[in-house]
Amino acid sequence: MKTIITTIVLALTLTFMNAQDTVKTEGTTITLTVPVKTEKGEILAGLYNEATFMKAAPLQSASSSIKNGKATLTFKNVMPGEYGISLFHDTNGNHQMDFEPSGMPKENYGVSNNVMSFGPPQWSDAKFTVGEEAVEMEIIM
């Protein structure tokens, strides 16, 4: 009888310890603050690595409404590495960047490191390093 009780207690203890391990989150958090001139629409952002930056779907995406002239967005469970962020102000709510016939964006946009250049942003300019600590940054459009 003692053996059965000991086995049950041990099994429950191991199960509880394993359950606690699965609750832990991996990676860190990136928090963005984006100053915005108008509160119409929302801010949509994507987190990219070198292989996906300006080429493919983001690793993570985030969106935020605008309150008191700013939007706050968060990417969670980001593993250490190099990343780039692009975002835009979706003023008309269609969830896509709108362009003029000439190819110029109709909606304001920004990228990590606040790179502004003629033509599309380059990975080498927009990349930043994520370590173990949480990252906070402001992106200006």
Image: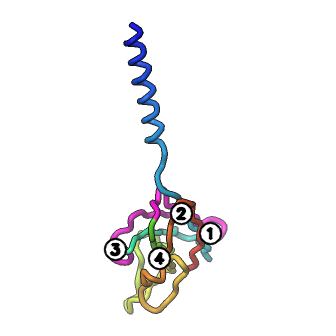
For the magenta stretch, what is the residue range? 51-80
Q: CA distance from mark 2 to mark 1?
A: 16 Å
| Nearer-the-camera pick, 17 or 141 | 17
For label 1, the SS is strand
Residue 139 marker: none
Q: Which kind of residue does numbered mark 1 sit on?
A: Lys
Going from the N terminus, do you reach mark 2 or mark 1 first? 2
Residue at which label 1 appears: 70
Name the quadrant containing residue 15. top left
| Nearer-the-camera pick, 90 or 15 | 15
**Residue 91 seen in render:** no
Residue 61 drawn in magenta? yes
- The local crowd at label 3, few if under 14, some if 14 to 19, many if 20 or more residues have their Cα within 10 Å, is few
Name the quadrant containing residue 97. bottom left
Residue 127 marker: 4
Residue at which label 3 appears: 51
| Nearer-the-camera pick, 11 or 92 | 11
Given the current orientation, which residue lies at the most extreme right position? 68
Going from the N terminus, do you reach mark 2 or mark 3 first? 2
Residue 30 marker: 2
Image quarter where the C terminus lies is bottom right
For label 4, the SS is loop
Q: Residue at x 33, y 72 (%)?
A: 56
Going from the N terminus, do you reach mark 4 or mark 3 first? 3
Report x, y in % for residue 115. Answer: 52, 84
Q: Which kind of residue does numbered mark 3 sit on?
A: Ala
For label 2, the SS is strand
Q: Are marks 2 and 4 in contact (CB under 8 Å)?
A: no
